[in-house]
Image: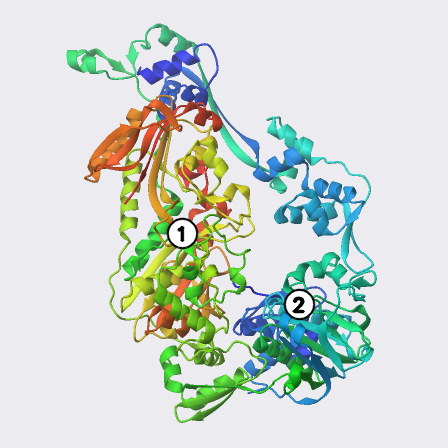
Amino acid sequence: MILMPTVSFRKDVFDKAVGSKLPLEKLAGELEQMKVEVNGVDANGVLSVEVTGDRPDLMSLRGIARALRGKLGVDKGVPKLELGRFSIKIVADKQALKVRPVVVGAVVEGVSLDEMSIAELFQQQEKLDSTIGRARKRVSIGLYDLDALKPPFAFKLAAEDAAFTPLKANGSMTMRQVLEEHPAGREYAHLLRGKYPVLEDSAGEVLSLVPVINNASSAVTPSTRRLFIDHTGSDRHACNASLNILCQDFFDAGCKVSKVAVEHPDGAKATITPDNSLQEMSFSASACNKLLGSSFKPPEIVSFLARQRIGAKAVGDRLDCSIPAYRYDFLHPVDLVEEVALGFGYLNFKPVVPSFFTRGSLNAETLEENACRDFMVGAGFTETLQYVLSSPARAAKSLSQGEMVEILNPVSGDYAAARGALLPGLLELLSKNTHYPYPQRVFEVGPVIVPDSLLPEKMRTQTRLACVSCHASSSLTEVASVLAEFAGRFKRKLSLSKLSSRQFLEGRQAEVLLDGKPVGSAGEVHPQVLENHGLQVPAAAFEIILG
Amino acid sequence: MNDVEERALRAAAKGWVDAKLLASKGVDYSALMSAVAKLESEGLLEVKRAAKCDLVLTPEGEYCCSNGALECILAQAVRELGGRATLGKALAAAELSPQQGAIALQWAVRKKLLAPRKDTSGETVFECVGEFVDELQPVLEKLKKGAAASSSERELVLSRRLAEEHEVKSFSFRATDAGRKALAAGGRIGGEVSQLSSQSLKDGSWRKLRLKPYDLVTVAAPLQVARKHAYVEFLQRMRESLAGMGFREVRAPLAELEFWNMDALFMPQDHPARDIHDVFKVKHPREGDLPDAEVFKRVMAVHANGGDTGSRGWRYEMDKRLSRSLVLRSHDTGISARTLRYDFRSPDRVFFLARVFRPDEIDWKHFIEFNQLGGFVVGESLSFRELLGCLEVFAHEVFGAKEIKFIPHYYPFTEPSVDLAVKVAGRGWTEVGGAGMFRPEMLSALGVSQPVVAWGLGIDRLAMLSVDVKDIRDLFSSDLELLRTR
């Protein structure tokens, strides 16, 4: 359920970044213990891995190598990051900030990219856009060849008929055409609320229609030497973390990374981005030990954190931690405790079983269901199990009345609603077994969902028992005698009253009451229903609510 | 000769009779089987037993039978779009579901009906290559009519799962000369009778009776016995195992407020697992009522800024409408939240076997409705090591694991979080689910101040081993033969 993005990159470059070449199995074992699952290496030497959704910093070769170097003890503590002073600025306009409230940027020099590393960079951009960026809503990333552009840059709104040549298009398009005709435009138009926020250079050349698509003229290619990176979005913290991830990766790769100034309207003080200051958080060794069931001394905790690339200082029982700016997963000190556990190694913990006494029990409804199942098997009925997901068509086929809870986004018409009764499923089962010898006697005990406006959920999950007996001489008498015996067994009083349902034959059906309370119905299945299911043998059935 | 025997013999006097046909006319099948076996042993009937495999179309097969092979539908759609189109456009024009589309594309490329090309903008498009003939549809039509298929046709439809083999056992019999004579003589064979009658016991004539001895090879025909469902029994054993370890079972509704399914677990409202593609939403009504103003307020606060937990929270304001929105529960952790809020005890061990619903591909190992075994333990002294201890016990006691492994993982509601992988006889490492210690943000909002260790394990893969089925959908099979033999 939790999104696990897949990332792939060249293993030889990765090994070089790690500084040692581990055998694949050993590597997979190490990575597995740091939230990176190895899928395998293909014939071209491309390693494919899956990363947990909380670690956007691990969605790249450099990020995984950095973490692994810590785990292997090659590097310790907060990774080095030196950012140059800003020489480029972005001037943000008030109207553009209304659509995308955050804009940040950075400059990278000395890059040397080949086709593969460009593909890996775009992959990282796409993974960041979709995870930490929440499909570009929270964060959207732009990468440009700085040498094709003339800073400073302006973040502003463009006119509807302003034109540029977007990537993956055949020629110049207006802003409006991009949103209506370009695949990226159609996908992300909903984020723009009818406006066209763009980054533009001092010569009036559009860098990109954010967060949709870049101008082809400043596209990143193997001849790119200097990069301009921008992030726009709704969440400053997320934009900053994502920008730090890219800056740290480029710095690790040996590039020179510099900050960018963002000037705000109305003369407010310029922001220098990215903010790469360390995140400070403290926790106590004793609380950590209580949570982990461990007895680590503060210096040990410091060394476990160092392996996780986190800086820590022990002050008595207290640990003051410095978390690199590229980490985006620290909400609460408990998150540092997990880092301690990871640094120590999950596999090194000695499991213990909680020793206090509690009384085990089965739920009362489970006990009742089991008693019913025992009874029905004793009465000669074979147990079946059906999905709760069903369809209005199936209910209609057995002329089942009553409202069904339908699903807004079904994946298949056969499973477009929750069942409101068990009988349609049992008849469907019989229809698939006409080749099988008769008599066929089947039952199910299970949940149905029925509307109930009095509950906060507006629906009630109800456990029911239903059975069908299908053979040449099946009759209401037969199923009614099962009910009579059932009532006797469970010390309930059975009575039957007149019923008129289309599911059953007129005059050969009854409402079922237990202790005077209506709980269901019984009858000989109407020939129309049998015909609908291709059944050529008579059948009798009942369905009652348990509980 | 009893009634059933006489009826069988009479029916068989004129020639071959099919047992199932006779049974469908109101003769009890198991009684008929033992009658025929007995008459055969007495030399009164000749019996022919045969088994053959019929091909029955799967839903996919039915679809292709009426609409044509998927790859041809796709290729035709591309042709109608002018001979080249992007996959998205072609799929939309062909009106194929994403699953069908994937199959269609795979075959269309393999059979060289379509070829991928890069267009000028670098986007992948598919082009028609030459003429094509749909050789699949005629075969499917033939099968649907019940006609026999050649072995290559058989292999073709089976390998693509367009049809399934249903073994049909046939069983027919006819009267021998001796049988016809016995019938004429009113069931008496050469002075021997085949059944002790109550009349003979009453009048003492049993002393003169000669009872025909049985042929002990054919005397035992299998009896059709009603039975419980193998998978339900598997679930039941699991329940008993947990109750035996001191866990109490709880239940919760299948249709749920998103508030309990997600918000109360400290899952931010823009979390990817809350996407419309990952949760079934209820069509009508869309929204329910928030039951508990106090807990809602606290949950809203921890999402916004961590409340009083020391967390920075997710830094956004929860949308009440989304909290009220109704879903079919997509995982079992909401049951823990409900139980911690409304039925809190300490110390406590709790478990639940929960049916959950999640949009997914439908194939042999995925279905959109399945069971999870979840639960939690509450106690002042609990730690991460107790969590691992619980998982270790489940792995051995519940799953019969030979080896286990703990793998770090991420869940929004637990920290630390861990996945449990087990190695069981007959297969390699299998990840069976997630676990962790509930986050302080979640517990605080629910009013719980003690540590809680929790887990949610998938059990259907292991149930498949236990029940011995190869397809996850067979856990809910409609096949009576399967239900009676598993």
Task: Please give the residue where the numbered disc 2 appears in the rendered image.
Answer: A126
Q: Is residue A267 above or below residue B96?
A: below
Q: Is residue A51 above or below residue A266?
A: above
Towards the viewer: A118 or A66: A118
Q: What crowding class fits label 1: few (fewer than 14 Cα within 10 Å), some (14-19), or many (20 or more)?
A: many
Q: Quadrant of residue A358?
A: bottom left
Q: Does the rendering let one see residue B151?
A: no
- Of the residues shown, which amino acid type is indicated by label 2? Glu
Q: Are marks 2 and 1 on the same chain?
A: no
Towards the viewer: A293 or A398: A398
Q: Does the rendering let one see residue B174?
A: yes
Task: Please give the residue where the numbered disc 1 appears in the rendered image.
Answer: B254
Q: Quadrant of residue A36?
A: bottom right
The residue shown at (60%, 40%) is B60
Q: Position of residue A424 (x, y in %)?
A: 43, 35
How far apart marks 2 and 1 lie (CA) works out to 36 Å
Chain to which the residue tagged by mark 1 belongs: B
